[in-house]
Image: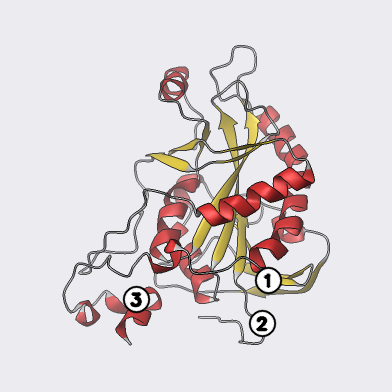
Amino acid sequence: MVRTTKKEPVKIAVIGGSGIYEIEGIDDVRELRVSTPFGDPSDVIVTGALAGVRCAFLPRHGRGHRILPSEINSRANIYALKSIGVEQIVSLSACGSLKEELKPRDFVIPDQIFDRTKCRPSTFFGDGIVGHVGIAEPFCNPMRDVLHRSVRELGIAHHFGGTYVCIEGPQFSTRAESEVNRKHGFSIVGMTAVPEAKLAREAEICYATVGLVTDYDVWKEGEEVSVEAVIACLNANAANSKRLIKHVLARLSERPTGCACNSALQFAVMTQQYTKSKAYPKLKLFLEKYNK
């Protein structure tokens, strides 16, 4: 297990697609290879200082975009970031729009998730330790407020609030699925916020996502999603994504800690004498603070 030294804490991380670790202006760039009890993360964790703030970057699909949404080892990714001291995670994620007013190239800061995934491990618990973590508010609201102020100050077209429906993928939606999601009132559709948000809460890490709209899914006649259109919008969104990261890091580093995310496990574990369970060594990173 690789850990940063106390002199160089890395408390803020960005999880996103390829290229995020190449943001101009990063100093003291290092690569950390972190092994976890849940396997290997998507790639090496790139750390550095941006505008004087220590930060970490992890491409969820691996460099070169080689990991399917269903293949992402989110448990390893979140565990690895926790192990190096990360307390806040900003997720950047391409998504489709389910509403006319959410246009391609807009940024969306959702406040809710609806899970339509089918076969992804979504908890660190099990194998002898039972834990039930509240996730009524799946994103850290104080972080969302900071992100909202940043996109507003930067003049980026954005929307604050809405529901992110997470599908399994890797295929895009059928027309029927897209119409059902619209009728449910969902705002954007993507493939990666689950189980990241759930696992971050179990790890007591503040987590918020920014949806980068690339298309109108398949519901809008004449503007159906295509790989070509998605790639074009991804490239257009890249510059604003990098601007946002630079702008928001200092503000996140100054944000007071101690929100509800940081104590999500305080009363979550139901198993008696769980420290004696064979599963405890895997969960010690999260639970040891409650056993002092």
Q: Residue at x 46, y 68 (%)?
A: 79
Q: Is residue 60 visible?
A: no
Q: Are marks 2 and 1 in contact (CB under 8 Å)?
A: yes
Instruction: Give how far apart the Cα atoms at labels 2 and 3 are.
Output: 24 Å
Disc 2 residue type? Glu
Q: Against 48, is 240 above or below?
A: above
Q: Where is residue 177 in the image (x, y as percent from the top left)?
A: 42, 23
Q: Closer to the N terminus: mark 2 or mark 3?
A: 2
Q: Gap between marks 2 and 1, in whole Å?
A: 10 Å
Q: Which of marks 3 and 1 is nearer the N terminus?
A: 1
Circles 3 and 1, Cβ within 8 Å, touching? The answer is no
Residue farthest to the right? 25
- Spot occupied by residue 40 in the image (x, y as percentages of width and height): 49, 67
Residue density around tag 1, few if under 14, some if 14–19, many if 20 or more, within 10 Å: many
Where is residue 201, by image quadrant? bottom left
- Camera-nearest residue between 41 and 104: 104
Q: Is residue 13 visible?
A: yes
Instruction: Classify residue 199 as left or right of residue 32.
Output: left
Label 2: few (<14), some (14–19) or many (≥20) C-alpha neighbours in 10 Å = few
The image shows residue 160 at horizontal and vertical percentages of: 59, 39
* Res. 8 mark: 2
Where does label 3 land, which residue? 287
In which quadrant of the rendered view does residue 24 lie? Answer: bottom right
Query: Is 13 placed above or below 285 here?
Result: above
- Graded by Cα atoms within 10 Å as few (under 14), some (14 to 19) or many (20 or more), the crowding at tag 3 reads many
Of helix, strand and loop, which one carries label 3? helix
Amino acid at dot 1: Thr
Residue marked by disc 1: 47
Disc 3 vs disc 1: which is toward the camera?
A: 3
Instruction: Indicate the quadrant where residue 113 lies.
Output: top left
